[in-house]
Amino acid sequence: YQDREGKIWVGTFGGYRIIDPVTLKVKNVEVNTTPGSRNNGIAILSFFQDKKQNMWVGTNNGLLRIDARTKQKEIFVHNSSNKNSISDNSIRAIVADKQGRVFFGTNDGLNMLLQDEKSFRRFSRSSGNKSSLSEDIIYAVSLTPDGALWVGTEDGVGIFDSEMLSFSSIRPDRRKAFSLSHKSIKSIFTAKTGIIWLGTHQGGVNKFDPNLPLFNLKRSSPFNPKGLSSP
């Protein structure tokens, strides 16, 4: 992840590294989301810099915020007795909408940081509710040019309308030739042109053009040396 100063943040097991691409200096930072205990098993999963320049670091055991001014670190973890705590400690994706509100994709739904900057609103799957998230396990979140958030889950794509605070869903449909190729969406990238690229679990890469209501599948092929190296 590259911040606004141009520095590159690289997640590792146990912490992260900040690389200055000009001087090539590397700063190693250890992360421990459970103060007083040994830092075992921490993996850094995501980074994001918000409109206040604060850095957010998602791990497999909680969320870390680094204050841009004071450099103080604050830890957020799930609390089963507090409905406004983050819903899960595994934070795989972080993004902001056009209003600057920060969202966190977790193993238990999508979380939106509230105005007090200490509590969260949760969005999760609700059986029988077509306007809810399609699946709670989230791998990726990307902001598209129209202001929607595309949420990659274990069961298709949830398209989040940040004005209405509701979802519509896209899932594979074998009856359609240009449908999503696989339900497990591991990564999403929105290009400056508006084209949306979706990486799936062994289902190839899907290309979505907002001007056309269909997906174009890119798969690996032993007969195409310039194609994908694997499914």
Image (cartoon, rainbow, N blue to C red):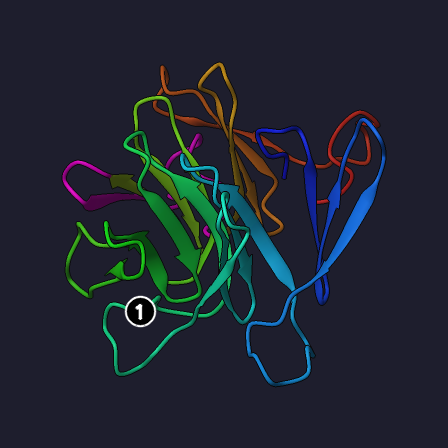
Q: Amino acid at mark 1?
A: Ser
Whether residue 165 is visible, yes or no, is: yes
Q: Residue furthest front?
A: 70
Q: Quadrant of residue 22?
A: top right
Residue 180 highlighted magenta (yes or no): yes
Say if 146 sits above or below 110 in the image. above
Which residue is disc 1 drawn over? 85
Q: Position of residue 158 (x, y in %)?
A: 33, 46
Say if 183 sits above or below 35 in the image. above
| 207 relative position to 130: left or right | right
Q: Quadrant of the N terminus?
A: top right
Q: Quadrant of the C terminus?
A: top right
Q: Position of residue 180 (x, y in %)?
A: 44, 39
Q: Secondary structure at mark 1?
A: loop
Q: Which span of residues is magenta-colored?
A: 162-184
Q: Main secondary structure of the magenta part?
A: loop
Q: Nearer the viewer, residue 52 or 187?
A: 52
Say if 24 sits above or below 213 in the image. below
Q: Position of residue 47 (x, y in %)?
A: 56, 47
* Residue at x-position 25% and y-position 77%: 82
Q: Quadrant of residue 155?
A: bottom left
Q: Nearer the viewer, residue 190 or 231?
A: 190
Q: Nearer the viewer, residue 138 or 42?
A: 42
* Residue at x-position 43% and y-position 42%: 95
Q: Position of residue 221 (x, y in %)?
A: 75, 35
Characterize the local packing of mark 1: few (<14), some (14-19) or many (20 or more) Cα atoms within 10 angstroms: some
Whether residue 140 is visible, yes or no, is: no
